[in-house]
Image: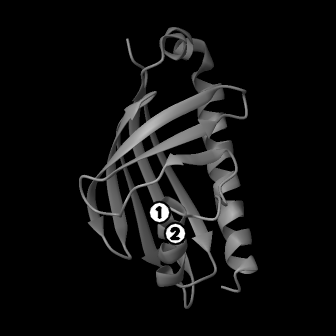
Amino acid sequence: MPASYSFTSRWSVPLAAPRVWDEVERMLRPGADGTWWPGVRIVEPAASLAPGEHLQLAVRSPLGYRLRVRLTIDAVDPGRSLAASSDGDLQGTGRLTVEPAAEGASVLVFDWDVATARRWMNATAWVLRPAFERAHAHVMTAGERGLRARLEQAGG
């Protein structure tokens, strides 16, 4: 039986929302110059950020396992939000929202409601759930740090 998880992560970034959105979009497009998100690799970028487009991610857990996720973009509000359905090792839905915060700053909010599809993860979720949740938090924290470093390197 699949194990279900709901995650909400908030990243505070000291740059305006349009600049942050541009960098997120750049990471997901073809020809991206690598990813700023340690542990996350774009295996197959989306042709464009539009409903119906697909992209494939490989996520390396700090615990040593890898997750393969295919995202289908369900809705895009350019500069503000992107909603997607996931298939593969994690099945469910997610949304990224970029919100303006204090002057010149923004907050990225990631909401994920997924269920694991890998047999070993489902069989061990009763005991490993806290470790899986910490691994998720680790990957998200690394992403926030990576984005901040990328934005500083690019000169904001």
Q: Is residue 39 above or below residue 100?
A: above
Q: Which mark is residue 100?
A: none
Left or right: where does residue 18 sit relative to residue 11?
left
What residue is shown at x 57% (from left), y 89% (from top)?
104
What residue is shown at x 73% (from left), y 79% (from top)?
152
Q: Is residue 84 above or below residue 64?
A: below
Left or right: where does residue 27 sit relative to residue 147?
left
Q: Residue furthest front?
A: 31
Q: Position of residue 112 (x, y in %)?
A: 42, 44
Residue at mark 2 to residue at mark 1: CA–CA distance: 5 Å
Q: Is residue 17 above or below residue 118?
A: below
Q: Amino acid at mark 1?
A: Arg
Q: Position of residue 32 (x, y in %)?
A: 57, 64
Which is nearer the eye, 122 or 89? Answer: 89
Q: Is residue 145 above or below residue 66?
A: below
What residue is shown at x 54% (from left), y 60% (from top)?
10
Q: Amino acid at mark 2?
A: Arg
Callout 1: 10 Å neighbours few (<14), some, many (20+)?
A: some
Which is nearer the eye, 145 or 31? Answer: 31
Q: Residue furthest bottom?
A: 103
Q: Which mark is residue 29?
A: 1
Callout 2: 10 Å neighbours few (<14), some, many (20+)?
A: some
Quadrant where the N terminus is found in the figure: top left
Quadrant where the C terminus is found in the figure: bottom right
What residue is shown at x 62% (from left), y 50% (from top)?
140
Q: Position of residue 62 (x, y in %)?
A: 73, 34
Decide: marks 2, 1 in contact (CB < 8 A)?
Answer: yes
| Residue under label 2 | 26
